Image: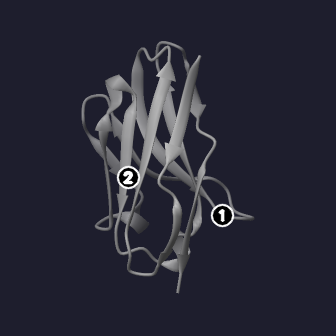
Amino acid sequence: QVQLVESGGGLVQAGGSLRLSCAASGSIVGVHTMGWYRQSPGKVRELVARIFSGGSEDYADYVKGRFVISGDVAKGSVYLQMNSLKPEDTADYYCNLYSWSKGREFWGQGTQVIVSS
C-alpha cells in the first residue's frame, strides 16, 4: 500500500503564494506520475498539475504561468508552488500518485486552500 500525506494549505489573500507538499510512504514502486488535483464544493475533481517519472510536466490552462510543480517522483515526493493566487483557486487540493506496477492510483486526504479577495 501507499500512503500520501499533504501539507501546506491555508488561508491567503489574493495575489499571495502558498507551497503544498506531498510525501508518499509505503511500497513506492513503479511510480508513473505524481500530481495535484483540486475540488471545490459542487464541482468535480480536476487536474491542476502533474509530473511524470521522466521529468515532464503537465498543467491545467488556468494555472499555467502561476503554479509550478516539482518533486522526485521515484522517491514519492511532489510540491506545488502556487503564486498569484486568485479567489477561484479556493478548493481542497489532493495529492495523487499513479503506479504502473500496481495498476492503480492513490490519493491523499486533501489540504484546504482558501484565497480571500
Image coords of residue 108 (percent x, y): 59, 38
Lateral position of residue 20 relative to residue 67, left or right? right
Label 2 sits on residue: 80
Q: Quadrant of residue 88?
A: bottom right
Give the residue type that dot 1 points to: Ser
Give the residue type that dot 2 points to: Leu
Lateral position of residue 33 relative to residue 98, left or right? left
Q: Residue reaching furthest left?
A: 55
Q: Quadrant of residue 77?
A: top left
Q: Earlier in the sequence, mark 2 or mark 1?
A: 1
Vertical arrangement, residue 23 with respect to residue 69, above or below? above
Image quarter hosting the N terminus? top right
Colouring style: one colour
Q: Are the residues flagged by discs 2 and 1 in contact, CB closer than 8 Å?
A: no
> In the structure shown, which secondary structural element does the residue marked by tag 1 occupy?
loop
Image coords of residue 97 (percent x, y): 49, 32
Q: Residue at x 35, y 75 (%)?
A: 84
Label 1 sits on residue: 40
Image coords of residue 5 (percent x, y): 54, 37
Disc 1 packing (10 Å; few <14; some 14–19; many ≥20): some
| Res. 2 mark | none
Q: Residue at x 28, y 67 (%)?
A: 65
Q: Residue at x 31, y 28 (%)?
A: 53
Looking at the rendered image, the disc whose residue lies closer to the viewer, 2 or 1, is 2
> In the structure shown, which secondary structural element does the residue marked by tag 2 occupy?
strand
Q: Residue at x 50, y 48 (%)?
A: 7
Disc 2 packing (10 Å; few <14; some 14–19; many ≥20): many
Q: Quadrant of residue 71?
A: top left
Pick the residue in front: 7 or 115.
7
Image coords of residue 76 (percent x, y): 40, 28
